[in-house]
Amino acid sequence: MLLLVGVAFVAGVVTAISPCVLPVLPIVLAGGATGGRRRPYAIVSGLVVSFTVFTLAATALLSALGLPDDLLRNIAIAIVLLVGLSLLLPPLGRLVERPFQALGRRQPGDTGSGFLLGASLGLLFTPCAGPVIAAVAALAATSRFSAESILVTLSYAVGAGVILLLFALAGQSGINLRAVRDRAPQVRQALGAVIAGVAVLMVFGLDLRLATYVPGYTHSLQRVERAPAAQREIDRLLAGHRHVLPDSQLRDFGQAPEFQDIERWINSKPLTLASLRGKVVLIDFWTYSCINCLRTLPYVKRWADTYRRAGLVVVGVHTPEFAFEHVPGNVERAVRSLGVGYPVALDNDYGTWSAWGNQYWPAKYFVDRQGHVRFAHFGEGDYQRSEDVIRTLLAEKALPKPVSASIRDQTPRELLTPETYLGSARIDRFVGSRLVPGREADYSIPKVVPQNSFAYGGSWTVEKERIVAGKDARLRLSFHARKVFLVLGSSGRVGVAVDGRRVKTVDVIEDRLYTLADLSGKADDHTLDLSFTPGTEAYAFTFG
């Protein structure tokens, strides 16, 4: 645990000097420059406490109260704007100070108000996602709290706070220089204008893209989070202290967890790992609209067919990502259309997912004849190694010829546009009109859509997981890939054009993954334009 706490502290330090901290810096500088000697310490203390609490509890709190997911961001925008305007407009500043004056005899610039300002910054501080903060976010999203996760989050916040304290002290020292002190009102107003500008960036979502315009100068420093020892600690924290990690060698990770809270079985009666003792079992966590999962299916199906008689049992654990993947009928249709003949367990309540401490789609766990986990592989690729593991675990009997080499490996080897979600809960790299979640609104596509970004045009309803087309609904995406896939739902038609040339029309007849484009040659930069009939639903792009 001490190693992970130390890594978290260093990760926080790196975050505080990375591009993602830029929106917070003006507030820290201005806050430190506009109060007493203790104010910088109070601001950073408030930020550390607030960031720790909100990082761990915000998701659960919003869910329990039934509040929208973007509430905290809206509060952050209001706070940034208020701080900026209070510095820019002295009468407003005096009005804002009155509640703090009522708290006691101390002046509004002292420790109490500084702590409150820092606490508000905990809502604004959105660190760049490294392995440590990503692990903490995953635990918070599933309401899995422990003393260790709290300590790791606090250590991360303290690491960032140390650097931010230096900035706050620098702001205080700068304002006390004679040349600056003589013009203190003008300096404060200038800082207020900068902070208000940050608020405007937040209104249009541009603060989230700020890091993309600044070189990633801290990438090499983040290697400490990706060191093997640190990764083992992070995976242990995520997996509930299980040590099932990818490894080049077979190891004994202990008894395999049983299937838990399975809603329904497809292609099989209910199974238990105890009943499969004496068999080699491959557990494959997947979901039917995941392109990465679909690219691994030919191997999993071929292994199931080839090694069944030798004692291999493949079990697909279908843990849904989107709401429509919870519907058993949809999964059954997908299993049939994909030609999956082995048992599939519907893990709608994440019972088996949690029991295994899994965090990936796809993820494969290899269980020996004694019921012990011996190997794990996350993601695509390394098929020959996985088959070698199967053959080793089955080696008590004569085996057929290996089959992995006979299937064309379609794992992408190039840097492609990342998976792109369209619903408000996980939206990223959206440009153009201001996003209006939860109700129908009109959007316009800007003249320029940057690489790996997208924009809406016409009328759309943006929900948490999906977008629903209205009148004249359009979408433009700038991507780098050869193949483009999109999860679509309901019924309707989607017109597809690539680089201004009409390619096809897709008839949407069920909720599943559709192929929009399959271009010749290697992956390259292209522009995708889509038009939708009203009522058509879209969830997420993936690329190949």
Image: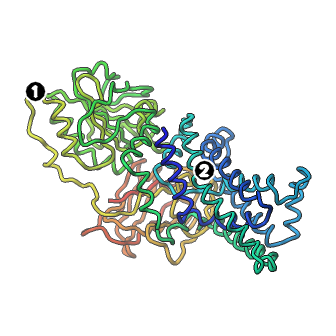
Q: Quadrant of the C terminus?
A: bottom left
Pick the residue in front: 277 or 320.
277
Percent of width and height locating residue 130: 47, 53
Q: Is residue 99 above or below residue 282?
A: below
Q: Looking at numbered disc 2 in the image, what kind of residue is underneath it?
A: Val
The crowding category of the residue bearing disc 1, from other C-alpha atoms within 10 Å (few below 14, some 14 to 19, many at least 20), is: few
| Residue designated by label 1 | 397
- Helix, strand or loop for disc 2: helix
Q: Is residue 498 above or below residue 129?
A: below
Query: Which is in the foreground here, disc 1 or disc 2?
Result: 2
Q: Is residue 473 above or below residue 260?
A: below
The crowding category of the residue bearing disc 2, from other C-alpha atoms within 10 Å (few below 14, some 14 to 19, many at least 20), is: many
Q: Looking at numbered disc 1 in the image, what kind of residue is underneath it?
A: Lys
Percent of width and height locating residue 5: 51, 43
Q: Is the C-beta separation of discs 1 and 2 under 8 Å?
A: no
| Residue designated by label 2 | 158
- Helix, strand or loop for disc 1: loop
Q: Is residue 318 left or right of residue 470?
A: left
